[in-house]
């Protein structure tokens, strides 16, 4: 088949590059957002607490055997499940943007009377951002918090009940 879908996925596994073109892409949703942390340093602007969330791309696709060989749609769904299960990093190419380092994180597939010889559904790809000191909010090297923290030890002092105190005096 020479027709190519408006969005496709390219992954590399075992030194080989595989490109997945869909029978049809009915919609593409791009989710690019910030997380505004409420716990910003005292005296700082809210901008300092803003962190990029991983980009997400949702592809609404239709797969059918009608335009391909028998079993095409089942193999395509199997390949998508394999990408998710094996957590392979992919490149998602759309007409608006190309996203690298993406993981297939969600598959919703439906087979119904409109598509008896295939399936339609949504594939959600989420950007993989490795956890490093620069990307993790828990990996802050400096704490400007004005809240006092007890870092001492309480020791092993035994607390006696009133009855034990009475017995110790006898």
Image (cartoon, rainbow, N blue to C red):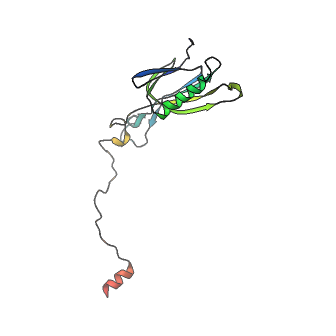
Query: Which residue is painted at 66% across and 25% down in the image?
Result: 117
- Can you name the residue that lies furthest to the bottom here? 170
In this rendering, would 120 be left or right of 140? right
Quadrant of the image containing the C terminus: bottom left
Is residue 104 something one can see in this rendering? no
Residue found farthest to the front: 70
Picture quadrant where residue 72 is located:
top right
State the residue lying farthest toward the top.
2
The one nearer the camera, 44 or 61, is 61
Which is more toward the observer, 26 or 65?
65
Position of residue 5 in the picture relative to residue 35 (left or right) = right
**Residue 33, percent across and down?**
47, 31
Q: Is residue 119 visible?
A: yes
Q: Residue at x 58, y 29 (%)?
A: 122
Q: Position of residue 143 (x, y in %)?
A: 31, 45
Q: Residue at x 63, y 17 (%)?
A: 67
Count of numbered badges drawn on the protein: 0
Q: Is residue 21 above or below residue 49?
A: above
Q: Position of residue 19 (x, y in %)?
A: 48, 20
Quadrant where the N terminus sits is top right
Q: Give the image quarter of residue 62.
A: top right
Residue at 55 percent across and 29 percent down: it is: 78
The picture places residue 7, in percent across and down from the top left corner, at 53, 19
């Amino acid at each position: 088949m020479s027709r190519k879908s408006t969005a496709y996925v390219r992954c590399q596994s075992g030194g080989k590059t595989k490109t997945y073109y869909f029978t049809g892409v009915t919609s593409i949703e791009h989710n690019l957002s910030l997380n505004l942390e409420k716990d910003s340093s005292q005296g700082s602007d809210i901008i300092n607490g803003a962190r990029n969330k991983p980009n997400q791309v949702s592809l609404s696709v239709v797969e059918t055997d009608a335009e391909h060989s028998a079993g095409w749609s089942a193999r395509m769904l199997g390949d998508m499940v394999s990408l998710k299960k094996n957590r392979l990093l992919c490149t998602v190419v759309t007409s608006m943007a190309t996203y690298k380092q993406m993981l297939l994180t969600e598959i919703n597939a439906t087979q119904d009377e409109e598509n008896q010889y295939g399936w339609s559904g949504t594939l959600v790809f989420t950007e993989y951002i490795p956890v490093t000191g620069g990307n993790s909010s828990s990996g802050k090297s400096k704490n400007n918090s004005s809240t006092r923290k007890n870092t001492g030890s309480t020791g092993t002092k035994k607390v006696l009940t009133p009855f034990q105190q009475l017995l110790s005096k006898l």
